[in-house]
Image (cartoon, rainbow, N blue to C red):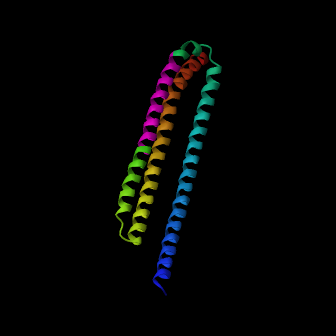
Amino acid sequence: MTAKTKKAKVDDTQFDAIKSAQKTATEQFSKIRDTASENFQKVSETLQDTMADVTDKFSNVHEATTQAGEILKQSGATAAKGTREFDTEVFNFARDSVASSVENVKAVSAVKSFQELAALQTSFLFNRMEETNKHLKSLADISVKTWTDAATPITEAVAKVTDKKAA
């Protein structure tokens, strides 16, 4: 076997390992994306149910319309604050991703062997997946908290008016 043939076999092995790592990363990312999609769907359904309850109660109460302006301002401010928190989290995720990728590129440039490269890339991908999961959970938590906090004053005001009418 010539030196060129040995080099070609090593290159094929390296290529296969990188291809396998890419496949694993793609599969993990798909799982993360699916989980995030399911979580956002649940949040959306919860919000829709909450808003449906609020709408039903609100439509039956004439008195609540006079107080709605202030309540909606308060809820809007809460939603705006939550949106800023959400945007900040997205920005932090992007910033962390870029910083992590830059550090990984620096580390890859200093690699001396394929085994070191494979270990480095595996660690990098695993850490990025963990960070992605952390940020997605945080985004879901911010969304749920924001919309729950925004809907609560409306729900409470409607309940007060409904209780007065029933009495």
The correct choice, above or below, for 153 with respect to 109 in the image is above
Q: Where is residue 110 shown, x and y percent of the image?
A: 34, 63
At horizontal 60% and vertical 30% (from top left) the residue drawn is: 51
Residue at (48, 30) in percent of width and height: 149
Where is residue 65? Give x, y as percent.
59, 14
Q: What predominant SS class does the magenta segment belong to?
A: helix
Q: Quadrant of the C terminus?
A: top right
Q: Name the spot of residue 55 as percent of width and height, x first.
A: 63, 25
Q: Nearer the viewer, residue 42 or 131?
A: 131
Reply yes or no: does residue 81 show up in magenta.
yes
State the residue in front, 109 or 149. 109
Residue visible at 44% across and 49% down in the picture: 134
- Left or right, residue 21 beside residue 95: right
* Front position in the image: 19 or 77: 19
Q: Which residues are magenta?
A: 70-93
Relative vertical location of residue 41 with respect to residue 31 in this rendering, above or below? above
Looking at the image, the residue that sits furthest to the bottom is 1
Q: Is residue 157 above or below residue 147?
A: above
Q: Is residue 70 left or right of residue 106?
A: right
Please, is residue 58 above or below residue 25 in the view?
above
Residue 100: percent from the left, percent from the top? 39, 52
